[in-house]
Each structure stands twice: as structure tokens, then as C-alpha cells.
Amino acid sequence: MKIERIFAHRVELPLVEGTYRWNNGNSVSVFDSTVVGVETDKGLIGYGEVCPLGPCYLPAYAEGVRSGLREMAPHLLGADPRELGKINQLMDSVLNGHPYVKTAVDIACWDILGKATGLPVCSLMGGRYGEKVRLYRAITQLPPDEMASNVAKYRSQGYTRFQLKVGGDADTDIARIRGAREVLDPSDRLVADANTGWSQHEAMRVVNAVRDLDVYIEQPCLTYQECLAVRRNTTLPFALDENIDSLAMLMRANRDLAMDIVNIKISKFGGLTKAKQARDLCVSLGIGMTIEDSWGGDITTAAISHLAHSTPEELRFTSTDFNSYNTVCNATGAPRRENGFMKASEAPGLGITPIVDAIGPVVWEVSSSSRGSSNAIHQAEPLSRPEPHLNKSVSHQVTS
């Protein structure tokens, strides 16, 4: 089996709540997602999706996905998509770094492998643990009383895990954390996620002020060293996210006892193959995990569900269902939240089928049929409009 064609769609994902806000005034109203298709000479097509959280969250941005594909994808033509190790080695050899660019292609190859074997990705990744996967709800940054109200609202929908977006003014964040904890039951879990937004001294003020509460502290500062300093001065359970982007960093953090929980974001590692490596290392080390990604729609949610459902339950802290945050459905067959939980599909591959009207036209493609000609790379229409700069304290919307 050989890769014969790779193509991309650009999909806008407006938010149910209108705007998503996190640290230091950053916000997004419409996410720019890329759906990638990988077609084989046997007629199988696999799909993947990648959606950066704007251009200022991680070293990733939406237009970079499609620009990176132009550089990388032609080199993958003729390769066997089922040989995931070789595919990843090939992607790394022709494009140094930029793991988010490789993510959707890797996911699509897993989808093909599942379809070729007749097995769901979950089974191929180690098996299905438990009947369902517990979800968290991210609570967009608002005044303390509004955030507490949103926590209560989503709790009534079945969520028992909450990721409170803090990382702003320390005094306001203390009020946010206390207000949210008050509306929860003792068995509910609350994570105060600063997304790198606090300075070290502000983080210390916050953790000292809420030390009497049952709350997790997640990624308080920008650098690993700052986070480690905060970790060593609090007894609250601690999670790392943005700093953990490789097996080397994961091993370093484990050696330093820098965390109790780690967030495994698929696109931060470069796809399901390398996220699975990180997951399996965490299983071996006994580290709890949140299995997720930066953002996405139904296809991303399906990929998350398979990685999460194939993770032992005792180490699966929580996961997420990004498709419930968006107003647009871009595929059928993706998991749907039921009372705060989701399940990975039992159909072959990811178990999804893209919705043609939702993903829109192909914006870029390359195929082996034109590889040797001057038209080897066919751009169906302008790759995309330049992504607007994401200013602090300003919400931007990509318009059509």
C-alpha cells in the first residue's frame, strides 16, 4: 500500500460560548482548523485534524500547518502509511521540528491502519480500558462570579472535572479559584490552569492563598525552572503542560518530581504515534495524565478518544471533548458527550466520516500522478488568508 495523494481543507470552528479566554487577556472567537486527507493506491483514505490555539499559545499557528504541508507532504508520496514508525522518521527527516505540522498526517495514517485491519485505533494502541472516558470542562476566563456560575452550569451537565482558566491578576485569580471550589462537591476535581500566565512570585502568592483548598495547580509559569520552584514550595497537587513536549522533558520532569499529572497534547508531540510513546512512558513511570490536544473539532476529538480510551484507567486523570465547544460539526461518528463522559468508536480506524459541506473545498493537494511534472503540487485555491494576529485583550474572528 502506498500514499498516492495528500490534501487539506481549511475549516472554521466558531465557539458555542462566543469567545474563549485564557491567560493575560488572550482570546479566540473562531478557531482555524486544518483537516488533512491521506489517500492510498488501494482506495483507502484516512483523515486527521490539527488546530493550534491561536498563534501565541505554543510555537504553532494555523497557516503554519498548511505551509509546512507544502514542504513535507510531497516527500511522503509512495510511502506505506501503515508503517507508522517509518512515516514519522521520514517526516522528521524532511522537516526539522514543527511537530504540529506532522500531527494530522500521522493521525490520518492511524485511520488508514485501522481501516486496513478492520480494527478501531483504540485496539491498535493497546486495547480499550473501561467503558468510558471521563471528561473535563475548560472554564473560560471571566470575572470570579461568572466563572463559578459556569462551573455550576457544566456540573449540572455531568462534568466532574474542571479546568479553570486563570493566569491573570493574582488577587482576581484567588477569588476565581475560591468561588469555583465553593460550588463543587468534595469528589469533584478542580484544576487552576494558569497556562504559563503567572510570574514566579505571583504564582507563590496564589498557591499560598489557596493552600487550604482541594485544587490542582497547572503550569503556573512560562519556564520549567519557575514551575519547578513553585512546585517545591507547595503541597498542592501539580500538573505540567506547555513545558512537556518531548520524551526527554518528560523524563527530566519525572526525575525532578516536578509534577503529579502531565497533559499529553497530541499535536505538541507530533501526532498519535509520538503521543502514544509519551503515554506509554507515563504508564511505565506511574504518572497520571490528561489526554487531549490544543483544540479541534470532531476528528481531533475522535483521535483524543482513542488515545485516552487505550490508557489504563488508574492513570487517566481526564480528557476532553472539543467538539462540544464548537458550533460546527465536521465529521460524523465522533464521540458525543454523555453525562460528562465519552467513548471511542468501535468502528475501524477513527470511526469518523468527514462532512463534505462542513469541511469545504480542498485548499491544497499533492499527488503522485503529477509528481514528476511542473504541476507536482496542485493548489486548488489560495492556501488561506493570512491568519489575523491574536492581540492580547482583543478577540479576533476569522471572516469568510
Image: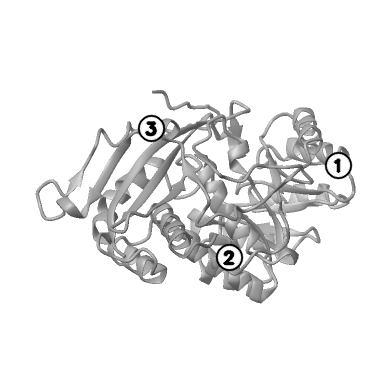
The residue that label 1 is drawn on is 184
Identify the element where label 3 is drawn: loop
The residue that label 3 is drawn on is 360
Instruction: Determine the residue positioned at 88% across, 39% down.
Output: 182
Sooner in the amino-acid sequence: mark 3 or mark 2: 2
Left or right: 238 in relation to 57: right
Query: Nearer the observer, disc 3 or disc 2?
Result: 2
The residue that label 2 is drawn on is 123
Query: Nearer the observer, disc 2 or disc 1?
Result: 2
Instruction: Determine the residue positioned at 60% across, 49% down.
Output: 196
The amino acid type of the residue labelled 2 equals Ser
Q: Position of residue 17 (x, y in %)?
A: 63, 28
Left or right: 359 in relation to 297: left
Sooner in the amino-acid sequence: mark 1 or mark 3: 1
Q: Residues within 10 Å of mark 1 (few under 14, many from 20)?
A: some
Name the outermost residue toward the top. Answer: 400
